[in-house]
């Protein structure tokens, strides 16, 4: 397989600790879980930089605890809030603006970058980390959806390594370990919880409220990812991510609905065997696996007790009620510019739904309309990727 997580440089294959860590998205749920791992194993990490978007107060609290040398926020207002909440005698270097994330991702003082920014905003910092030859613990699937072809090329040039944090892709990574030959692999199987509306028909989905869609049954996630899970777009983005990570065509990546979220994904081989990765749904597990790879460490997560779980069930996704998964597969098949359209239209539509400007079933309709209007364009540079992303956002917003 043409995977970008199989040929390890010495820094990963024979790791030295402590690793110097930058967390982009430190104030979100992934950042919270990562810092729990770092706090439990302080001998393995030096927290060098934390980035916190617009939440200056929480970022200041985290910095006061972990004392990084660098911090970053997106706005001047968040920067002021950050500085006002720092303890006396501690003054990290503060970087402000979208470019601050790129600087943190590429700085020489950092070994490992955890990219956990939500949405397309993660593309440029992730690409910068790849260009700088970093270890990248990737929790931002949109980076690969927008520019997987560019990030893969950067990894080839620099020796950068992507370690997949998403529970599904981390499960695939572990299921592929020791079985790297192309001729052995039959397919990858991503599992989906089905979200809060599994089994519901389109008539019901037309009545869905914001609060209902945010109530994920198994995972504690941010608002945008929770809505993506409810529409199954999250699984569509993960399908595209898996194709980029493992160099596979979309027909070799399937999705099965598994409501219990105990089996995180499966790898099927040509002899018919399937290797499943199982565990309780807690992001500390895949995060710790990536941050400490190739070593395993303890985490504060309840042990899986299969007898207590009792029953594991699986079913096919309902692509009529949840067409976003179909749209993602079609977008990847159509060429590298279509997934950019898919993601940009989705982000605008999800934001509009969260603001109660549109209904739940309008989300896939808006995305499909954007894809239908799109003719393939050149996206061979970061500039062309970002230009198309901006254009689609403007057009989608204008049509709401």
Image: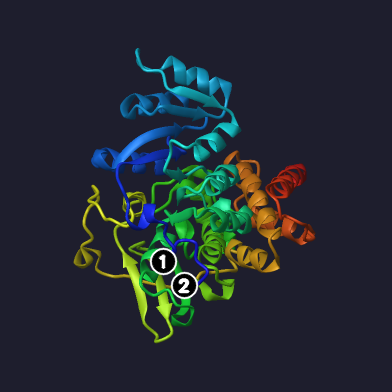
- Residue sitting at 56 percent across and 44 percent down? 128
Residue 193 appears anywhere in the view: no
Residue 66, picture quadrant = top left
Q: Is mark 2 on a helix, strand or loop?
A: strand
* Residue at horizontal 43 percent and vertical 23 percent from the top: 57
Which residue is farthest bottom?
Answer: 271
User: Could you tell me residue 210's position as x and y percent?
Assistant: 53, 44
Would residue 159 be found to the left or right of residue 149 on screen?
left
Q: Which of 223 and 147 is in front in this view?
A: 147
Q: Give the vertical position of 54 relative to 295 (above or below).
A: above
Distance Cα–Cα, label 2 vs label 1: 7 Å
Density class for disc 2 (Cα within 10 Å; few <14, some 14-19, many ≥20) is: many
Q: Does residue 180 appear to the left or right of 65 in the view shown?
A: right
Q: Earlier in the sequence, mark 2 or mark 1?
A: 1
Marker disc for residue 14: none
Residue located 27% across and 38% down the image: 39
**Circle 2 residue:** 188
Viewer-closest of 53 and 355: 53
């Amino acid at each position: 397989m043409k995977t970008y997580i199989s040929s390890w440089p010495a820094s990963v294959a024979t790791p030295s600790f402590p690793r110097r860590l930058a967390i982009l998205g430190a104030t979100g749920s992934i950042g919270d879980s990562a810092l729990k791992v770092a706090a439990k194993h302080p001998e393995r990490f030096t927290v060098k930089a934390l980035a916190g978007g617009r939440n200056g107060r929480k970022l200041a609290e985290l910095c006061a605890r972990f004392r990084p040398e660098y911090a970053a926020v997106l706005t001047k207002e968040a920067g002021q809030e950050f500085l006002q909440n720092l303890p006396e005698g501690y003054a990290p270097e503060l970087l402000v603006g979208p470019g601050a994330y790129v600087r943190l991702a590429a700085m020489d003082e950092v070994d490992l970058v955890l990219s956990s920014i939500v949405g397309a905003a993660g593309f440029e910092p992730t690409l910068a980390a790849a260009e700088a030859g970093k270890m990248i613990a990737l929790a931002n699937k949109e980076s690969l959806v927008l520019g997987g072809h560019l990030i893969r090329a950067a990894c080839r040039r620099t020796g950068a390594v992507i370690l997949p944090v998403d529970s599904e892709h981390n499960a695939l990574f572990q299921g592929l370990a020791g079985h790297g030959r192309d001729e052995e692999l039959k397919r990858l199987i991503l599992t989906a919880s089905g979200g809060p509306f599994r089994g519901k028909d389109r008539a019901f989905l037309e009545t869905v409220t914001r609060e209902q869609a945010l109530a994920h049954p198994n995972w504690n996630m941010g608002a945008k990812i929770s809505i993506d899970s409810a529409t199954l777009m999250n699984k569509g983005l993960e399908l595209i991510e898996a194709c980029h990570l493992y160099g596979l065509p979309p027909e070799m990546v399937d999705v099965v609905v598994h409501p219990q979220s105990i089996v995180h994904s499966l790898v099927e081989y040509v002899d018919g065997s399937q290797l499943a990765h199982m565990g309780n749904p807690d992001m500390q597990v895949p995060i710790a696996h990536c941050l400490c790879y190739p070593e395993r460490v303890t985490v504060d997560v309840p042990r899986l007790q299969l007898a207590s779980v009792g029953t594991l069930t699986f079913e096919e996704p309902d692509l009529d009620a949840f067409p976003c998964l179909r749209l993602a597969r079609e977008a990847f098949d159509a060429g590298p510019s279509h997934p950019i359209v898919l993601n940009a239209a989705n982000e605008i539509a999800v934001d509009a739904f969260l603001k109660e400007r549109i209904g739940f079933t309008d989300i896939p309709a808006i995305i499909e309309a954007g894809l239908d209007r799109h003719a393939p364009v050149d996206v061979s540079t970061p500039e062309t990727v970002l230009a198309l992303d901006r254009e689609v956002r403007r057009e989608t917003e204008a049509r709401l």
